Image: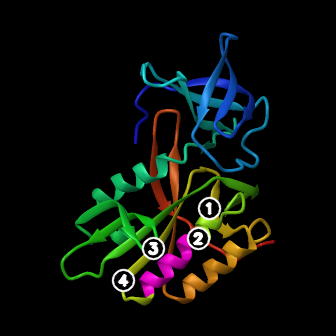
Protein backbone atom coordinates (compact mmCIF):
# COMPACT_ATOMS: atom_id res chain seq x y z
CA UNK A 1 0.00 0.00 0.00
CA UNK A 2 1.46 3.32 -1.07
CA UNK A 3 1.06 6.32 1.19
CA UNK A 4 -1.51 8.76 -0.13
CA UNK A 5 0.84 11.72 0.09
CA UNK A 6 4.64 11.90 0.12
CA UNK A 7 6.08 11.45 3.60
CA UNK A 8 8.37 14.08 5.08
CA UNK A 9 11.24 13.39 7.53
CA UNK A 10 11.21 14.83 11.04
CA UNK A 11 12.67 14.38 14.50
CA UNK A 12 10.51 13.38 17.44
CA UNK A 13 10.41 15.81 20.33
CA UNK A 14 7.95 13.87 22.46
CA UNK A 15 4.89 11.66 22.30
CA UNK A 16 2.12 12.45 24.79
CA UNK A 17 -1.53 11.75 25.54
CA UNK A 18 -0.98 8.58 23.47
CA UNK A 19 -2.23 10.14 20.26
CA UNK A 20 -0.12 13.30 19.96
CA UNK A 21 3.51 13.87 19.01
CA UNK A 22 5.53 17.07 18.88
CA UNK A 23 7.98 16.95 15.99
CA UNK A 24 10.63 19.10 14.32
CA UNK A 25 10.66 19.25 10.52
CA UNK A 26 13.88 19.58 8.53
CA UNK A 27 13.39 23.34 8.18
CA UNK A 28 13.36 23.67 11.97
CA UNK A 29 9.65 24.32 12.34
CA UNK A 30 7.72 22.43 15.01
CA UNK A 31 4.44 20.65 14.30
CA UNK A 32 2.01 18.43 16.17
CA UNK A 33 1.31 15.08 14.51
CA UNK A 34 -1.44 12.55 15.14
CA UNK A 35 -0.09 9.25 16.48
CA UNK A 36 -2.45 6.46 15.40
CA UNK A 37 -1.18 4.03 18.00
CA UNK A 38 -2.80 3.47 21.42
CA UNK A 39 -0.10 1.03 22.56
CA UNK A 40 2.96 1.64 24.68
CA UNK A 41 5.24 2.01 21.59
CA UNK A 42 8.05 0.65 23.73
CA UNK A 43 11.40 1.54 22.17
CA UNK A 44 9.81 3.59 19.39
CA UNK A 45 9.12 6.97 20.99
CA UNK A 46 12.56 8.09 22.10
CA UNK A 47 13.10 11.86 21.81
CA UNK A 48 15.35 12.67 18.89
CA UNK A 49 14.34 9.63 16.84
CA UNK A 50 14.09 10.11 13.10
CA UNK A 51 10.50 9.64 12.00
CA UNK A 52 8.39 10.11 8.88
CA UNK A 53 5.18 12.11 8.79
CA UNK A 54 2.36 12.10 6.27
CA UNK A 55 1.02 15.60 5.53
CA UNK A 56 -2.64 16.17 4.74
CA UNK A 57 -4.79 19.08 3.64
CA UNK A 58 -8.09 17.63 4.84
CA UNK A 59 -10.08 20.51 6.39
CA UNK A 60 -11.92 18.00 8.61
CA UNK A 61 -8.70 17.00 10.36
CA UNK A 62 -7.41 19.14 13.21
CA UNK A 63 -3.81 18.00 12.75
CA UNK A 64 -2.05 18.39 9.42
CA UNK A 65 0.43 15.55 9.95
CA UNK A 66 0.19 11.87 10.80
CA UNK A 67 3.12 9.91 12.24
CA UNK A 68 3.66 6.85 10.04
CA UNK A 69 7.20 5.46 10.45
CA UNK A 70 10.19 5.26 12.73
CA UNK A 71 13.44 5.33 10.76
CA UNK A 72 16.12 3.34 12.60
CA UNK A 73 18.73 4.97 10.36
CA UNK A 74 20.34 1.62 9.57
CA UNK A 75 18.20 0.75 6.57
CA UNK A 76 15.30 -0.55 8.67
CA UNK A 77 11.89 0.94 9.46
CA UNK A 78 8.99 0.34 11.83
CA UNK A 79 5.41 1.26 10.97
CA UNK A 80 3.58 2.83 13.91
CA UNK A 81 0.10 3.34 12.40
CA UNK A 82 -2.07 0.56 13.87
CA UNK A 83 -4.82 1.17 11.32
CA UNK A 84 -2.54 0.25 8.44
CA UNK A 85 -2.22 -3.53 9.04
CA UNK A 86 -5.92 -4.19 8.43
CA UNK A 87 -5.81 -2.22 5.19
CA UNK A 88 -2.67 -4.01 4.04
CA UNK A 89 -4.01 -7.44 4.98
CA UNK A 90 -7.34 -6.76 3.30
CA UNK A 91 -5.59 -5.83 0.06
CA UNK A 92 -3.48 -8.98 0.29
CA UNK A 93 -6.48 -11.20 1.01
CA UNK A 94 -8.46 -9.76 -1.88
CA UNK A 95 -5.47 -10.29 -4.18
CA UNK A 96 -5.02 -13.82 -2.74
CA UNK A 97 -1.42 -13.03 -1.84
CA UNK A 98 -1.44 -14.90 1.49
CA UNK A 99 -0.80 -18.47 0.41
CA UNK A 100 -2.44 -20.19 3.38
CA UNK A 101 -5.67 -18.24 2.76
CA UNK A 102 -5.53 -17.95 -1.02
CA UNK A 103 -8.48 -20.28 -1.64
CA UNK A 104 -11.04 -17.85 -0.26
CA UNK A 105 -12.96 -15.72 -2.73
CA UNK A 106 -15.08 -13.56 -0.43
CA UNK A 107 -13.57 -11.16 2.13
CA UNK A 108 -15.92 -9.43 4.57
CA UNK A 109 -14.44 -6.97 7.07
CA UNK A 110 -15.73 -6.18 10.56
CA UNK A 111 -18.27 -8.99 10.93
CA UNK A 112 -20.02 -9.43 14.29
CA UNK A 113 -19.38 -12.69 16.11
CA UNK A 114 -19.03 -14.10 19.61
CA UNK A 115 -20.00 -11.92 22.54
CA UNK A 116 -20.15 -8.32 21.31
CA UNK A 117 -17.03 -8.79 19.18
CA UNK A 118 -16.16 -8.12 15.57
CA UNK A 119 -13.76 -10.24 13.56
CA UNK A 120 -11.41 -8.29 11.33
CA UNK A 121 -12.14 -10.49 8.32
CA UNK A 122 -14.57 -13.32 7.60
CA UNK A 123 -13.44 -15.34 4.61
CA UNK A 124 -15.65 -17.71 2.68
CA UNK A 125 -15.55 -19.84 -0.45
CA UNK A 126 -17.53 -22.75 -1.79
CA UNK A 127 -16.26 -26.03 -0.41
CA UNK A 128 -14.17 -24.45 2.36
CA UNK A 129 -14.95 -23.82 6.03
CA UNK A 130 -15.41 -20.16 6.88
CA UNK A 131 -12.20 -18.56 8.11
CA UNK A 132 -12.26 -15.99 10.91
CA UNK A 133 -9.13 -13.84 10.72
CA UNK A 134 -8.01 -11.51 13.52
CA UNK A 135 -5.11 -9.15 12.69
CA UNK A 136 -2.63 -7.83 15.26
CA UNK A 137 0.05 -5.22 14.63
CA UNK A 138 3.46 -6.17 16.03
CA UNK A 139 6.08 -3.45 16.60
CA UNK A 140 7.96 -4.43 19.78
CA UNK A 141 11.58 -5.58 19.46
CA UNK A 142 13.76 -6.03 22.56
CA UNK A 143 16.20 -8.57 21.13
CA UNK A 144 17.82 -8.28 17.70
CA UNK A 145 15.74 -10.04 15.08
CA UNK A 146 12.87 -10.95 17.45
CA UNK A 147 9.47 -9.22 17.33
CA UNK A 148 7.18 -9.63 20.34
CA UNK A 149 3.49 -9.20 21.09
CA UNK A 150 1.95 -7.52 22.99
CA UNK A 151 3.85 -4.40 24.04
CA UNK A 152 1.44 -3.78 26.93
CA UNK A 153 -1.27 -5.67 28.81
CA UNK A 154 -4.22 -6.33 26.51
CA UNK A 155 -7.37 -7.76 28.07
CA UNK A 156 -9.08 -7.14 24.73
CA UNK A 157 -6.50 -9.29 22.97
CA UNK A 158 -7.04 -12.16 25.43
CA UNK A 159 -10.79 -11.88 24.85
CA UNK A 160 -10.23 -12.17 21.10
CA UNK A 161 -8.22 -15.35 21.64
CA UNK A 162 -11.09 -16.85 23.63
CA UNK A 163 -13.56 -15.94 20.90
CA UNK A 164 -11.34 -17.49 18.24
CA UNK A 165 -11.01 -20.68 20.29
CA UNK A 166 -14.79 -20.98 20.38
CA UNK A 167 -14.92 -20.53 16.61
CA UNK A 168 -12.31 -23.26 16.11
CA UNK A 169 -14.18 -25.68 18.35
CA UNK A 170 -17.29 -25.09 16.23
CA UNK A 171 -15.47 -26.42 13.17
CA UNK A 172 -14.52 -23.17 11.45
CA UNK A 173 -11.01 -21.94 10.69
CA UNK A 174 -9.82 -19.43 13.25
CA UNK A 175 -6.68 -17.49 12.38
CA UNK A 176 -4.63 -15.04 14.42
CA UNK A 177 -2.48 -13.11 11.96
CA UNK A 178 0.41 -11.16 13.46
CA UNK A 179 1.57 -8.55 10.97
CA UNK A 180 5.08 -7.47 11.96
CA UNK A 181 5.48 -3.81 11.06
CA UNK A 182 9.26 -3.99 11.33
CA UNK A 183 11.85 -4.80 8.69
CA UNK A 184 14.52 -5.96 11.15
CA UNK A 185 12.84 -9.09 12.57
CA UNK A 186 12.71 -12.69 11.34
CA UNK A 187 10.98 -14.32 14.32
CA UNK A 188 7.96 -13.61 16.52
CA UNK A 189 7.31 -14.55 20.16
CA UNK A 190 4.74 -13.86 22.84
CA UNK A 191 5.94 -11.25 25.36
CA UNK A 192 5.08 -13.44 28.33
CA UNK A 193 6.72 -11.14 30.86
CA UNK A 194 4.61 -8.18 29.73
CA UNK A 195 1.25 -10.00 29.67
CA UNK A 196 1.33 -13.57 31.01
CA UNK A 197 -2.47 -13.79 30.74
CA UNK A 198 -2.34 -13.14 27.01
CA UNK A 199 0.50 -15.63 26.54
CA UNK A 200 -1.48 -18.30 28.41
CA UNK A 201 -4.58 -17.50 26.36
CA UNK A 202 -2.56 -17.97 23.18
CA UNK A 203 -1.49 -21.45 24.32
CA UNK A 204 -5.11 -22.41 25.09
CA UNK A 205 -6.32 -21.00 21.77
CA UNK A 206 -3.67 -22.99 19.90
CA UNK A 207 -4.74 -26.16 21.69
CA UNK A 208 -8.32 -25.44 20.62
CA UNK A 209 -7.27 -25.30 16.96
CA UNK A 210 -6.61 -21.60 16.39
CA UNK A 211 -3.97 -21.09 13.69
CA UNK A 212 -1.21 -18.53 14.16
CA UNK A 213 0.29 -16.83 11.12
CA UNK A 214 3.17 -14.38 11.34
CA UNK A 215 3.87 -12.23 8.30
CA UNK A 216 6.56 -9.62 7.76
CA UNK A 217 6.36 -6.34 5.89
CA UNK A 218 8.38 -4.41 3.35
CA UNK A 219 8.49 -0.80 4.54
CA UNK A 220 9.86 2.35 2.91
CA UNK A 221 8.82 6.01 3.12
CA UNK A 222 6.81 5.32 -0.04
CA UNK A 223 4.86 2.18 0.85
CA UNK A 224 4.10 -0.65 3.25
CA UNK A 225 3.26 -4.09 1.88
CA UNK A 226 3.22 -7.61 3.22
CA UNK A 227 6.23 -9.80 2.57
CA UNK A 228 7.28 -13.29 3.67
CA UNK A 229 5.99 -15.46 6.54
CA UNK A 230 8.02 -15.27 9.76
CA UNK A 231 8.74 -18.02 12.27
CA UNK A 232 6.84 -18.19 15.56
CA UNK A 233 9.05 -19.20 18.49
CA UNK A 234 8.35 -19.92 22.13
CA UNK A 235 8.48 -17.30 24.91
CA UNK A 236 12.01 -16.12 25.61
CA UNK A 237 11.42 -14.40 28.95
Q: Is 71 colored magenta in this rendering?
A: no
Mark 1 to mark 4: distance in Å? 29 Å
Label 4 or label 2, whichever lies nearer to me, is: 4
Of the image marks 3 and 1, the number of the one nearer the N terminus:
3
What is the magenta segment's predominant secondary structure? helix
As drawn, 45 above or below 132: above
Residue receiving disc 4: 172
Could you tell me which secondary element the residue under label 2 belongs to? strand
Mark 4 to mark 2: distance in Å? 24 Å
Return the residue nearer the eye: 194 or 223: 194
Residue 186 marker: 1
Return the residue nearer the eye: 76 or 175: 175
**Residue 170 seen in the figure:** yes
Residue 175 marker: 3
Of the image marks 4 and 2, the number of the one nearer the N terminus:
4
Q: For the residue carrying disc 2, how many other residues have a C-alpha within 10 Å: few (<14), some (14-19), or many (20+)?
A: some
Q: For the residue carrying disc 1, how many other residues have a C-alpha within 10 Å: few (<14), some (14-19), or many (20+)?
A: some
Residue drawn at point x = 65 percent, y = 23 percent? 10
Of the image marks 1 and 4, the number of the one nearer the N terminus:
4
Q: How many marks?
A: 4
Q: Which residues are magenta?
A: 159-168
Could you tell me which secondary element the residue under label 4 belongs to? loop
Of the image marks 1 and 2, the number of the one nearer the N terminus:
1
Label 2 or label 3, whichever lies nearer to me, is: 3
Q: Are the residues flagged by discs 1 and 2 in contact, CB closer than 8 Å? A: yes
Mark 4 to mark 3: distance in Å? 10 Å
Residue receiving disc 2: 231
Q: Quadrant of the C terminus?
A: bottom right
- Residue 117: where, in percent of width, then height? 46, 67
Label 3 or label 1, whichever lies nearer to me, is: 3
Amino acid sequence: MRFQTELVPARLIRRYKRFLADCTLEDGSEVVAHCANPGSMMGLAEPGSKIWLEPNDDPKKKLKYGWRLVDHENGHFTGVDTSLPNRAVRAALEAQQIEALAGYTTVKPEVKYGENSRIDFLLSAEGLPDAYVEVKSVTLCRQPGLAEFPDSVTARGAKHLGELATVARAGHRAVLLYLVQRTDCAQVAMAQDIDPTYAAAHVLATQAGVETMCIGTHITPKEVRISAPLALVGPTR
